[in-house]
Image: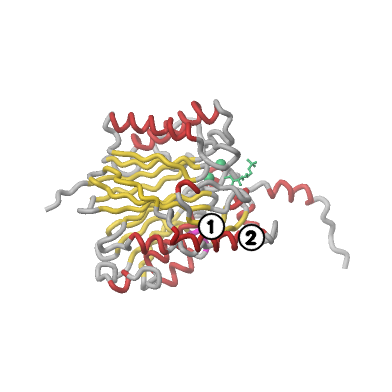
Amino acid sequence: MHDTFRVTVSLIKADIGSLAGHHRVFEEQLEVAKAKLKRAKEEGLLIDYFVFNCGDDLQLLMTHTKGENSPDIHRLAWETFKEVTERVSKRLKLYAAGQDLLVEAFSGNIRGMGPGVAEMEIEERPSEPIVVFAADKTEPGAWNLPLFKIFADPFNTAGLVIDPKMHDGFVFEVMDVIEHKVVEIACPEELYDLLALIGTPSRYVIRRVWRKRDRLLTAVASTTRLSLIAGRYVGKDDPVLIIRAQHGLPAVGEILEAFAMPHLVAGWMRGSHHGPLMPVSLKDAKCTRFDGPPRVIALGFQLCHGKLIGPADLFDDPAFDRARMLANQVADYMRQHGPFMPARLGPDEMEYTTLPQVLEKLKERFKPVEE
Ligand code: F6R
Ligand code: MG
Ligand code: MG
């Protein structure tokens, strides 16, 4: 018999300034964040933690028994971001110091204050492999296509066909980030309805996935849209995602398979362009060309009574070389379009950038058409 143990995995991230423009988090920022979480572990607030970065986003992966939306855990993350901003980003004049901290004081829940959050409270299985994803220079809707493949596409996930525990399918919670509403869609029976929504990733974002037969929570993604909170372009909402794997859930390899095709996502250069999502190792999680191309990392862990055993740097593998090569080819092709749609985002999404200021200037020069 295995004794039941409820653990919460919280991944909270923010861009609070970076080295060489929006390139990457600086070592000293990581050190200050690690020291802060180490103290929280010693004091018993955290069971374990892992601090890392994806490009210019500082990522705090934490395990604890406080449940989702715990004010204690959210405060810890907020104070960590504040401390790193004050002690490192501002002192060293790193670029865009404190960028994602949109409010002054912490008010109980970090959601809506700028940082991105993915959290799941789960009962730890006898063996609990999880995969943690983080992407830079894109937005939460970037997970729609891979999450669809992982949990609803039998051509990606063989287990949907072969494994009786997965054969009933999965339930997706889709969030309308404009209307701030959610809807549950069950697959395979409502597969086309799901696609009708999530094919618009700027508006409809997959937030959670459950296994249908027993409502086992399987995946949780961040859904923060900074521009909708701030009413202006602040930075793209580089998203995070946690997925449980194996033993009646998609295998780690089925989860990773969804990233073998570097699909087009929004968020490249000034949050204003589409680009291929390139799967990379931790060491390559830093954006360069045209502030990109958008990148994604995948870290595998085993949970052991809440301890994070790992990580395995899962895209650090020649099996993803072809995806990276294709991403570079797609990047070449997209870049040749310069400022033209659809390489550049459409007018709706450009509303939150600085483009409207430029267009405003031209307004008065427009004259009625003489027929
Ligand atoms: C930031 C990002 C970058 C910036 C760009 C311009 O995450 O996506 O592409 O938008 O470097 O930045 P500013 O306006 O700060 O010079
Ligand atoms: Mg940045
Ligand atoms: Mg970023």
Q: Which residue is mark 1?
A: 202
Q: Position of residue 30 (x, y in %)?
A: 45, 35
Tell me, for residue 332, which label it has, or none. Answer: 2
In screen coordinates, is 56 left or right of 149?
right
Magenta-colored stretch includes residue 201 = yes
Q: Amino acid at mark 2?
A: Asp
Q: Is the residue 32 above or below the residue 186 in the image?
A: above
Number of marks in picture = 2
Residue at the location (42% across, 45% down)?
Answer: 117
Q: Is the residue 218 above or below the residue 235 in the image?
A: below
Element assignment for label 1: loop
Quarter where residue 66 is shown: top left
Q: Position of residue 34 (x, y in %)?
A: 39, 33
Looking at the rendered image, the quarter that the C terminus falls into is bottom right
In screen coordinates, is 115 left or right of 161?
right
Which is nearer the eye, 2 or 72? 2
Q: Which residues are magenta?
A: 200-204
